Image (cartoon, grey):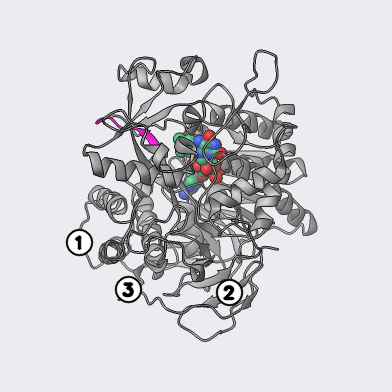
Amino acid sequence: MIGGAVVELGAASRPERPAANHPTPSSAPARYVLSSMNRVIDDRRYLIPFRSSLLPQIFTEVLVIGAGVAGLRAAVEAAALGSEVIVLSKDTLRNTNTAWAQGGIAAILREDDSIESHVQDTLAAGAGLCDEPAVRLVVEQGPERLRELIDWGMALDRDAAGELAVGREGGHNAFRVFHAGGDATGRELERCLYERMLKTGRVRLFDHCFSLDLITQGTEPGAPVLGAITYHERFGLQMIWARTTILASGGAGQLYRETTNPKPATADGLAMAYRAGATLADMAFVQFHPTTLYLPGAGRSLISEAVRGEGAHLLDQAGNRFMLDEHDMAELAPRDIVARAIVRQIARQGGRHVWLDCRHLAHFEHRFPGISAELKRFELDPAKDLIPVHPAAHYMIGGVRCDLQCRTDVPGLLVAGEVSASGLNGANRLASNSLLEGLVFGQVAGELAAKAAASNGSRSGPVPVVSDIRPSDHGELDLADVRSSLRSAMWRNVGIERTGPKLHDANDMFDFWSRYTLDKIFDEPTGWETQNMLLVGSLVAQSGAWREESRGAHARADFPNPVDRFRVHDLWRRGRSQPLLLDVPAEVSV
Ligand SMILES: Cc1cc2nc3c(=O)[nH]c(=O)nc-3n(C[C@H](O)[C@H](O)[C@H](O)COP(=O)(O)OP(=O)(O)OC[C@H]3O[C@@H](n4cnc5c(N)ncnc54)[C@H](O)[C@@H]3O)c2cc1C
């Protein structure tokens, strides 16, 4: 069990409702008091008014929200074990974080590497906040999950001798990152899992189907999840009732003006889970990728860490390798260290970017065909030109808290993948561990959901669910302006280097914008996404303001060091203005 003790800040040790992974209250520091935070984000249980009985009804045993690595792997498992499954994706399968993944999947298949070494690298990157049992589970199951993909036809790259090719990425002390299509690992993984899912014959995929909210009977936290209310461009609103719902809705990169994530990564799953009463953990932790292409007018395309793994150097304006002075792993230091070093270097030298030097790398185009093609679009030749790079928001480390079986503290709701906080990533995710996390916990969630379906044949719902929301008193809203202001404020105030005043400013802004944005009733996804982003942005800023220390991906200029009493998970639940604290369960050797 992911264990530890939970405590409410600012209160005596008051018993909490039991949860699989938050067992008992204990004593812990009680210092932080939120500002005059108006919890507007807690007012709404559902995004829209509806009467369930008036909507079309769909039934399934397992509902999977998300068709990235975690959702597809969960669907494959549940269907293979006999369950009928519906998978939702709000966009196409090509537009997931999974499909955009470049570098690869970390796992131990080589005899000159070891599980223990991968565990230790993961713990070191996690900076004291990893749950070691979760780390061990993922790393130990990694080889099996990867071999299974090879059996299912995933075309991992091979070297001239026909052996699986391996790369190395930041924070790894060994070459253990397996890739496909050079830098197209995610696309090949998505293809492989999708085809495997089709073969089961028990999965219906609804794409362009937007999940608005998880359905519970009653609005009190702790009420079981019974499925979701969804919106499809053609079919409109629908109720999907399920015995088990697996939330695998991915990340939140779109919260930030600068991000590597595709457009759908708008934090919907985190917001849905929060509204349904689930606990969110460690929301301050957002990983910023050090190297995205920085050209006005270009998207922030990722220049994979694997490029630095192959030996590329980061140079300042004068052409010096500044990372040599920053860390003994230089360009291959953990991502937070490299990202912050780049920001500091830019502050010292001026301008908007540093350079990535790949000119000495042989076979760049062969090894990184996707990146080469993107550079070509801007007339950059990595054999001759330096590449302008800058950090961008990349991975949401915080998420819906779950135990080793993917259970949340809401019955009927499992989580897997980037939306979850399983304890694997601690305060900072190790490169190439997240596809692995999705594979491992996707399988675990799918198996548990199938078992639940088999143990009790009765289907969920329909129960009468009514959401009444009175119309907003405020006038028209320029939604695009709210969204872009939010993304800019997140980048400026809740970005790579934070301070208390900036975080509190962000909180005040989000609170104010929430008053006239979260009370609106929208009738299409852009409005719902913006409401979700505002809710989750608020939680990231609140968690960041609470965490008066620097640890892993969370860097506070006003508290530059880790502080032992913050070596806890901070837990956020609807209806509470203060976080609860959960001890990190096992000793880690960092
Ligand atoms: C550019 C890039 C490169 C990366 N490279 C690597 C790498 O090399 N190795 C590695 O390990 N990790 C990498 N990562 C991280 C990794 O890709 C992700 O963490 C991982 O793929 C997340 O998988 P997931 O299944 O949790 O979510 P995703 O793959 O993002 O899938 C989320 C799914 O949820 C759906 N969804 C979301 N909201 C809703 C809603 N409201 N209604 C219905 N459906 C919804 C989406 O449509 C999508 O189908 C990279 C990420 C990016 C962006």
Q: Earlier in the sequence, mark 1 or mark 3?
A: 3
Question: Is 36 on the left or on the right of 350, as rendered?
Answer: right
Q: Nearer the viewer, residue 356 or 487?
A: 356
Q: Secondary structure at mark 3?
A: loop
Can residue 394 be seen here? The reply is no
Amino acid type of the residue tagged 3 in the rendering: Asn
Q: Secondary structure at mark 1?
A: loop
Q: Which residues are magenta?
A: 291-296
Q: Are marks 3 and 2 in contact (CB under 8 Å)?
A: no
On residue 93, which mark appears?
none
| Mark 2 lies on residue | 6
Q: Nearer the viewer, mark 3 or mark 2?
A: 2
Q: Nearer the viewer, residue 264 or 561?
A: 561
| Mark 3 lies on residue | 38
Label 3 vs label 2: CA separation?
24 Å
Question: Is 258 on the left or on the right of 302, as rendered?
Answer: left
Location of the N terminus (image quadrant):
bottom right
Q: Is residue 82 above or below residue 493?
A: above
Amino acid type of the residue tagged 1 in the rendering: Gly
Q: Quadrant of residue 112?
A: top right
Q: Is residue 169 above or below residue 275?
A: above
Label 2 vs label 1: CA separation?
42 Å
| Mark 1 lies on residue | 475
Q: Quadrant of residue 353?
A: top left
Within-10-Å neighbours for mark 3: few <14, some 14–19, many 20+: some
Residue that appears at 46% across and 22% down: 370
Question: Is 174 on the left or on the right of 218, as rendered?
Answer: right
Q: Is residue 343 above or below residue 304?
A: below
Q: Nearer the viewer, residue 487 or 330?
A: 330
Amino acid type of the residue tagged 2 in the rendering: Val
Q: Quadrant of residue 548?
A: bottom left
Label 1 vs label 3: CA separation?
21 Å
